[in-house]
Image (cartoon, rainbow, N blue to C red):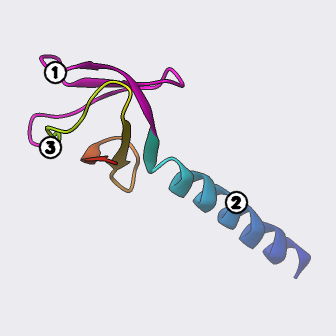
Amino acid sequence: MKKIAIAVAAVALFAGAANAASSVSGTVSAYNAEARVITFDNGKSVSVPLDVAIPASLQVGGQASIAFDSEGDRVNAVFTR
């Protein structure tokens, strides 16, 4: 019974970590529209695929969020605030 509880706890921990990485948010520090790369003030850069719309309101110094697919490796959407 103890082994099952440990296994369940481990799965819950890793599932939570995967969900935490399903989006990135923050202040935009750089935006290369031609290359479609958004860089945040924490140093994280994200390349946005051509089939994903980038809001016209995206600007350096503004707030943005990027949502990824369930595996966390493909951008699904870009939002601004």
Instruction: Name the residue type under label 1.
Output: Ala
Is the residue under label 2 in contact with that under label 3 (CB below 8 Å)? no
Magenta stretch holds residue 45: yes
Determine the residue positioned at 44% across, 51% down. Answer: 22
Picture coordinates of residue 59, whole percent (x, y): 27, 29
- Residue lying at the far bottom in this picture: please name it: 1
Q: Is residue 58 above or below residue 33?
A: below
Q: Looking at this view, is 42 or 61 the one in front? A: 61
Separation of marks 1 and 3 at Cα, in angstroms: 13 Å
Which residue is nearer to you in this view: 81 or 37?
Answer: 81
Badge 3 or badge 2: first in the primary sequence = 2
Q: Which amino acid type is shown beneath numbered disc 2?
A: Leu
x%, y% of residue 27? Answer: 44, 32
Q: Give the residue type that dot 3 points to.
A: Val
Element type where label 2 sits in the image: helix
Q: Which residue is mark 1?
A: 33
Q: Which residues are magenta?
A: 26-51
* Nearest to viewer (mark 1 / mark 3): 1
Callout 3 secondary element: loop
User: Sequence-wise, which precedes: disc 1 or disc 2?
Assistant: 2
Q: Which residue is mark 3?
A: 52
Q: Earlier in the sequence, mark 1 or mark 3?
A: 1
Measuring from the top left, give residue 78's x and y in whole percent. 26, 45
Q: Which residue is mark 2?
A: 13
Of labels 3 and 2, the one closer to you = 3
Is 30 placed above or below 5 here?
Answer: above
Q: Residue at x 83, y 68 (%)?
A: 6
Q: Quadrant of residue 28?
A: top left
